Image (cartoon, helix red, strand yellow):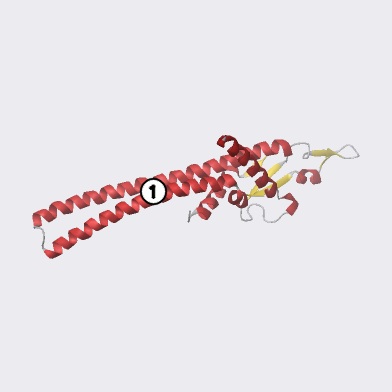
Amino acid sequence: MKNVPLILSIIAVAVALAGGVYSMTLGPKAGKAVSENGADSTNVTLATSGIVYVDLDRIVQEYDMASDLGAVVETKVKNIQDEVTRRGKNLENEVIEFQNKINKGLITRSVAEIQSQDLQKKEAEFNEYANQKNNEVIEEQTVMMNQIADAIKTFLDKYNQEKKYTMILTNQRGVPVITADPSLDITDDVIARLNEEYIKEKNKNNK
């Protein structure tokens, strides 16, 4: 699909906006520690060690589910666009033929008026059809974005039940994570496990 990179970027935005800062319940890694003299003090080291981030752009671009869904939507969109183009071309040819008849004086004024009204009606119907199909394209792309966003969010929920991070930040083009220790970036692990889970589910459904 020519617009796949743009669509995938939009998906990443949608996930980021939906998730914002992906916060988890504070676990044993965060909170307060008791100092030697018995007073509570913030254990900064332990708290920050529970904060990680993922690069949403990379996840969406390298997620096999996104590629598969993108290919399906691409085919549907192309079929819709081809049909709209075909109907538009047919209408254009009718208009050209009508104008040629008028220019050559091959039809009477009364016949020309009737045919002109008919063409105007066809044009209005075509515009309505084209708008309807455009809405279908938008709906197909929106559903795809929602499916991918939901799959990523569901996976991260389950993923963090195991990892028990204090917080998982969603990073996109350096926002909100401007700079950070590379060791806090868990994108590679998330992508690998996302794809592993997706392939297993896909193979199971294909049996």
Quarter of the image with the C terminus in it? top right
Residue 6 is left or right of residue 195, and the answer is left
**For the residue marked with disc 1, what is the amino acid?**
Ile
Q: Please name the residue shown 34% across and 51% down the image.
A: 84
Residue 22 percent across, percent down from the top left: 64, 42
Q: Please name the residue shown 43% across and 49% down the image.
A: 77
Residue 93 is left or right of residue 58, and the answer is left
Residue 46 seen in render? yes
Residue at mark 1: 80
Neighbor class of circle 1 (other Cα within 10 Å; few <14, some 14-19, many 20+) is some
Question: In this orientation, which residue lies closer to the viewer: 76 or 53?
Answer: 76
Residue 199 percent across, percent down from the top left: 61, 41
Q: Residue furthest front?
A: 207
- Please identify the quarter of the rendering in which residue 104 is found: bottom left
Residue 133 percent across, percent down from the top left: 37, 46
Question: In this orientation, which residue lies closer to the viewer: 175 or 125?
Answer: 125
Q: Residue furthest bottom?
A: 104
Question: In this orientation, which residue lies closer to the viewer: 117 or 101?
Answer: 101
Secondary structure beneath label 1: helix
Residue 25 seen in render? no
Disc tally is 1
Residue 88 percent across, percent down from the top left: 30, 54
